[in-house]
Image (tube, grey):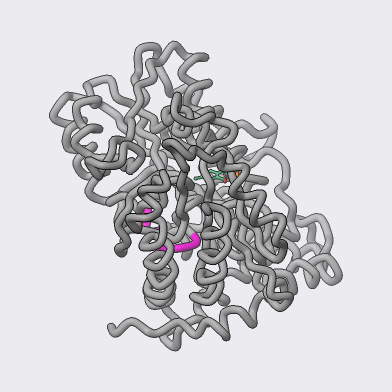
Amino acid sequence: MPIHLLDVNYARSQFPALKTGFIYGDNAGGSQVAVNVADRIYEYLLNSNAQFGADYSVSMESTRRVMVEAPEAAMKLFNAHSPDEIVFGASSTINLENLARGMEDDIQAADEFILTGEHEANAGPWKRLAARRGAVVKYWTPTPTSPNNPYSLNYKVEELLPLITSKTRILAFAACSNILGTILPVKDIVHAARDTAKEKGSKKLEISLDCVAYAPHRLIDVRDWDVNFCVFSFYKVYGPHISALYVRMSSLKESISAITHHFLKVHQKSYKLQPGGPGYELVYGTTGVLPYLFSLTPENDLKASFDAIAAHEQKLVQPLLAYLTAPEQIERGVRIVGAEAPGITRVPTISFIVVGEKVTKSSDIVKVFDKKGGIGIRFGHFYAYSLVKELEPRIDVDDGVVRISLVHYNTAKEVERIIEILTEALA
Ligand SMILES: Cc1ncc(COP(=O)(O)O)c(C=O)c1O
């Protein structure tokens, strides 16, 4: 199938927030909301705002929207088997915490968890579960990809496999880091990890994949990847502030105990992990994301839309990386944190620091942008605290990195403006 060119003007027209001309460069923090998502939230609140589960007409409509339409739409975004595998929660952080709590009875002392020290959302819940149950935590750490840049970090499967033993029970990592911006070959990693675990005699390995920084840029496929758990946040994928968690049905049945009220008949459904109702209007609002994505290409096919998004995003990645890795910037002390080369596995989440003789704080660079106005980028550790802390002592974890994070509705012209301001900030 040929890759369609993304019609960026059309895409932008679906986001009223972009009409002001403000340059949104902090999308990995949160994207703008597509108009039909906002319309659905408004429509739900005004026309079907009733407690679901009753037999009167408005309640039945609410039930259909929240309990049927929304999980079915999220199921498509994950490529899950069943809407019963979808859990809604206020955030990916709380969804993963709830997941870890639901697994409490299935974890034994001396089980081993392998985690990446990235966003704390897919590390903290497992660390706390390990502490409660006496399990052992090991870290899969990223290493440089370029000999000249110690910060050009990426995760390599050959550094994961030796960590796997007969006791490995959980592997938790991210499909794409919210700092490093490189997409990992999830399918290959999972395949190699499962093979190694089997060879070593592991009886049960479950894999938790954080797709929060991945989902705005590429297609998720939990079936093809063979993961047990997968999470993303709709507020980074053009939707409202709510998260969806995929839990494979076999894990839901065999590994998870309900964390809901004891009298609720949750059976094997995902409500086992949904204590209390998530914001109904937001759950219904998520159903607007799928039609927006479909509308980007004529095929009505998610893969075609994400191919068009990926192709457009390369046009944003290339000039930014070329600028930041040019000899004058290297001389100035600019170092990319993450892979330096553009390519299809690189998303437009670009982080850097400035080291050397003219070391410059990340906050000072961002200040230049804030002073100009009309543009939003950010500095810090972005909750990937352990990852950024590893960059010390050369940088301070709270000052962290400068992060410019773009998505498909950003334009090449906006990148030109970013480069203009960067040139001033680095002078
Ligand atoms: C990679 C990654 N994982 C998890 C999260 C947490 O998501 P939420 O804010 O929905 O808890 C974030 C948020 O920035 C993230 O970037």
Residue 127, x across and y down, in percent = 48, 22
- Nearer the observer, 322 or 304: 322
Is 23 a magenta residue? no
Q: Is residue 262 left or right of residue 137?
A: right
In the image, the segment drawn in magenta is: 216-223
Q: Is residue 338 left or right of residue 247?
A: left
Q: Could one spot residue 408 in this view of the protein?
A: yes
Which residue appears farthest toward the right when viewing the image? 46
Q: Could one spot residue 253 in this view of the protein?
A: no
- Nearer the observer, 126 or 426: 426
Which secondary structure is most common in the magenta stretch? Answer: loop
Residue at 58% across / 62% down in the picture?
421
In this rendering, the answer to whether 305 lies above or below 86 is below
Report ligand 1 position as a quadrant: top right
- Nearer the observer, 406 or 292: 406
Which residue appears farthest toward the left when viewing the image? 199
